[in-house]
Image (cartoon, rainbow, N blue to C red):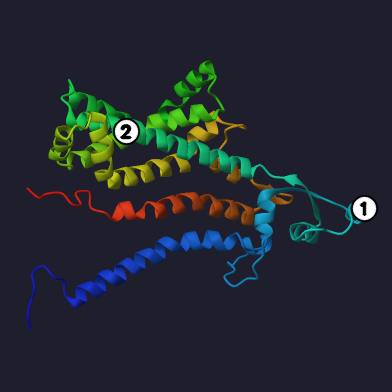
Amino acid sequence: MSFSATEPSIRTKWFAGLLVIGYAIVTLIPLLWIIATGFKSPADSIAYPPVVVFEPTLEGYVNLFTDRTRATEQMLDDAGPPTTWYEQIARDRGTVISGPSRYGERFLNSVIIGFGSTALCMILGTMAAYAFSRFKVPLKDDLLFFILSTRMMPPIAVAIPIFLMFRNLGLNDTHLGMILLYTAVNLSLSVWLLKGFIDEIPVEYEEAALIDGYTRFQAFYKVVLPQAATGIASTAIFCLIFAWNEYAFAVLLTSGNAQTAPPFIPTIIGVSGKDWPAVAAGATIFLVPVMVFTILLRKHLLRGITFGAVRK
C-alpha cells in the first residue's frame, strides 16, 4: 500500500467533505428560513413552535409591494369583486389595496447607489493601485498606510461630521451623495487589494507592449486589466456587499428620495402590526442582485491571476 505525503487519505477527504457539508447546512438554514417565511401566512410566521410544513401563499409579497387599508363589509361590497389574484388575497384579509408601496423605489435606489459606488470605486481604485504598483510615488509607503488607516476607523464614528458636511453641500438624501460616500469608504479596500493583484503581473508584459508601440494607457488597458480581472472581480464583490448592506449611513443621511432598502425593510408594518412575511419577502428579493452579480463574475474568480504567465 503506497502512501503519499501530499495526497490526502480517503479518511481525510471524507472528513473534509463532511465538514464542508455541515458548515454549508448551518450557513444556509437561516437563509432558507427567511425564504420560507416569505411564503407563510402571518399566523404561521409567528407560530410557536415554529411551523415547518405549511401551505405556501404569496400574501407576504402582495403586502410588500402594496399599501392596504382595512375595510368594512359595506366598503368591500361597494368596491365590487376583485379583478386580480393579489386583490383577492387582500380581500381575504378584509383589506383593500390603496396603491403601490415604496419598496420598489427603495430597491431601485439600492441598485443605483450600490452599483454606482462600486463602479466608481473600481475605476479610481484600479488607477491608484496601478500607480502605486508601477511608478515611484514619493512617500509611497506613507500614503498607502494613510489610505489603509481610513479603513481602520469605524465609518459611523464620523457620521456626525459627514452629516453636517452633506447638509452644507446639499448632498443629504441624494444619490450622488451616497455614491460618493460609499466610494470614499471602500476606496482604501480596493486600492490595497488591487495593488496586490497588479504586483503579481509581470512588468515584462507592459514593456513588450510599449516596445510594440503601445502607449502607457493602451498597455494598461489591453495588458494589465485583462490579467487583473480576477482581482477586480473579487474586489468589486466586496465593495458591492458593503454598499448594498450598509445601514447606518443610509438611516442618517437619507429619508425619502435616496433611501435604500436596508432602512426601509424593518419599517414594513401591516394593518395589524409587524408583517413578518412581507419583511422576509423583501429580504429575499434584496439578496438577488448580489447573488446574480457574484454568479456573473464567478469565471473571473476561478481564474488564476497569473494565467499564461511565464514562471520565473
- Bin the neighbour count of mark 1 within 10 Å (Cα to Cα): few under 14, some 14-19, many 20 and up: few
Q: Which residue is mark 2?
A: 125
Q: In the rendered view, does 106 fall on the left or right side of 294?
A: right
Q: Position of residue 21 (x, y in %)?
A: 35, 69
Viewer can see residue 195: yes
Q: Which residue is mark 1?
A: 78
Q: Secondary structure at mark 2?
A: helix
- Asked whether 108 or 208 is in front, the reply is 208
Marks 2/1: CA–CA distance: 60 Å
Residue at (63, 71) in percent of width and height: 54
Residue at (16, 71) in percent of width and height: 8
The amino acid pointed to by label 1 is Asp
Q: Position of residue 6 (x, y in %)?
A: 11, 67
Residue at (43, 33) in percent of width and height: 182
The amino acid pointed to by label 2 is Gly
Q: Is residue 27 above or below residue 154?
A: below
Q: Secondary structure at mark 1?
A: helix
Residue at (58, 55) in percent of width and height: 280
Q: Residue 56 is drawn in which quadrant?
A: bottom right
- Asked whether 245 or 304 is in front, the reply is 304
Q: In the rendered view, does 157 fall on the left or right side of 208?
A: right
Viewer can see residue 153: no
Q: Is residue 244 above or below residue 177?
A: below
Q: Residue 229 is drawn in which quadrant?
A: top left
Q: What is the number of the mark on residue 307?
A: none
The image shows a total of numbered marks equal to 2
